[in-house]
C-alpha cells in the first residue's frame, strides 16, 4: 500500500471513531476539521507536532527530494518511537529507534542528531 493511500485510510478511520462522531459537529466535519483529544501531560508534545507541521507546510514550496525523504523518515521514526513508548508504558523491553540519517542530514552542521 502506498504511503498516500495508507494515510488516507488512517485519516478515514480516525474520522469515523466514536470520539469524532460524537464530539465534532457535522458542519465542522464538512469543512474539513477534525477532533483531537490531548491529555494535559501531552500538551508539550502536541504543540511540538504543530510546529513541525507548520514547518513542513513551509517546505512544500521547496522542490527538494531530500526534504520529502526526510519527511518520510520522520513519519516512520515517529511511529517506531510511539511503539517504543507504548512498550515502555507496558513495562516491556524495547529499543529506542535511531534517528534516521535523512533527518540528521537535513539538520546538518552542529544540529546533527547524535547516534
Image (cartoon, helix red, strand yellow):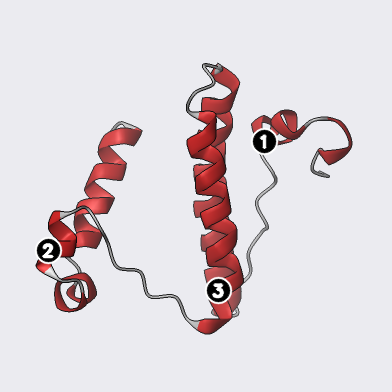
- For the N terminus, which image quadrant? top left
Sequence-wise, which precedes: disc 3 or disc 1?
Answer: 3
Where, by quadrant of the figure, is residue 93 drawn? bottom right
Q: What residue is disc 3 on? A: 43
Q: Nearer the viewer, mark 2 or mark 1?
A: 2
Q: Nearer the viewer, residue 25 or 106?
A: 25
Q: Nearer the viewer, mark 3 or mark 1?
A: 3
Task: Kindly identify which numbered label has been placed on residue 8.
Answer: none
Image position, residue 17 (x, y; %): 20, 69
| Vertical arrangement, residue 9 with respect to residue 91, above or below | above
| Residue drawn at (57%, 41%) of the image | 55
Sequence-wise, which precedes: disc 2 or disc 1?
Answer: 2
Q: What residue is disc 2 on? A: 27
Q: Nearer the viewer, mark 2 or mark 3?
A: 2
Image position, residue 57 (x, y; %): 48, 37
Residues packed near mark 3 inside 10 Å, few (<14), some (14 to 19) or many (20 plus): few
Q: Nearer the viewer, residue 58 or 100?
A: 58
Q: What residue is disc 1 on? A: 103
Amino acid at each position: 500500500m502506498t504511503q498516500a493511500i495508507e494515510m488516507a485510510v488512517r485519516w478515514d478511520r480516525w474520522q469515523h471513531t466514536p470520539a469524532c462522531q460524537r464530539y465534532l459537529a457535522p458542519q465542522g466535519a464538512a469543512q474539513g476539521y477534525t477532533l483531537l483529544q490531548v491529555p494535559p501531560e501531552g500538551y508539550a508534545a502536541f504543540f511540538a507536532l504543530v510546529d513541525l507541521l507548520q514547518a513542513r507546510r513551509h517546505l512544500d514550496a521547496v522542490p527538494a527530494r531530500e526534504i520529502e525523504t526526510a519527511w518520510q523518515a520522520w513519519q516512520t521514526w515517529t511511529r517506531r518511537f510511539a511503539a517504543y513508548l507504548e512498550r515502555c508504558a507496558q513495562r516491556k523491553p524495547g529499543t529506542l529507534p535511531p534517528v534516521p540519517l535523512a533527518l540528521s542530514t537535513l539538520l546538518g552542521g552542529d544540529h546533527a542528531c547524535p547516534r
